[in-house]
Amino acid sequence: MKTYGKAYQSLLGKEHINYKKIIFADEDKDIVYKVLNELKKDKYNFIIILSSSTQASDIINGVDSDKYTYIGTDMFGSSVAPTLLYQLKDLNNKIYFVRNIDTAFDKKVSSFNQEYYKEFDIDPLMISLYAYDAVNVIIKSYKKFGFVATRSIDGINYNGISGINIANNKYNQSTHFTVLKVGKDGYEKKSVSY
């Protein structure tokens, strides 16, 4: 998270945007209480949260969240930790984060979304893209090598809809990012203008 912090600070500085940095150790059991107390001391327009989705949801749930716009990291939509979406009391907040879903695959993603809806009668969540790619990587690896292990996965070429790209024994994640908003129906892709 330190890298995210440096990136945000650099961008805010370049744009001459005043900000206050509140740093607490992730291991601090009172982190949420301390952050909530800090938020009561001043007025903020944006709150950038560089922590896990569990801590972020505790902070967002603990304040009058309509007052703020929240910006987070890809951990807000993590596929390996509880997602923020299912931990929030109110899904009508202004909460944004980035994921490295490659926007170059919009046609593939759109096609996937249509097929998913046709099959299950609901819209897919962002994690559905990752699950789709994971299953396809396993299938492709098994078909080529007869087993699935790190070395067999490294030995395939796969360009997925979530931005994953495996080629030449390397795992390459997309360097293109998409801004997502937490909404009452899941994560919504937002267009960004600069």
Image (cartoon, helix red, strand yellow):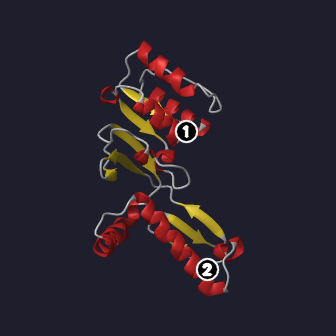
Task: Please tell me whether mark 2 sits on a helix, a strand or a loop.
Answer: helix
Residue 54: give x, y in percent of width and height. 51, 40
Q: Residues within 10 Å of mark 1 (few under 14, many from 20)?
A: few
Residue drawn where x is 30% and y is 29% of the image: 66
Task: Please tell me whether mark 1 sits on a helix, a strand or a loop.
Answer: helix
* Residue named by callout 2: 141
Q: Is residue 133 visible?
A: yes
Which amino acid type corresponds to the residue marked 1 in the rendered image?
Answer: Tyr
For the residue pair 146 and 18, the one nearer the viewer reads as 146
Which amino acid type corresponds to the residue marked 2 in the rendered image?
Answer: Ser
Closer to the eye: label 2 or 1: 2
Residue furthest toward the right?
151
Rendered view: 130 above or below 156 = above
Q: In the image, is 109 to the left or to the right of 141?
A: left
Residue 93: give x, y in percent of width and height. 32, 37
Residue drawn where x is 44% and y is 68% of the image: 161
Residue drawn where x is 40% and y is 47% of the image: 85
Residue 157: give x, y in percent of width and height. 58, 76
Q: Give the numbered dot on residue 4.
A: 1
Q: Is residue 162 visible?
A: no
Q: In the image, is 139 to the left or to the right of 36?
A: right
- Which quadrant of the figure contains the N terminus? top right
Disc 2 + disc 1, Cβ < 8 Å: no
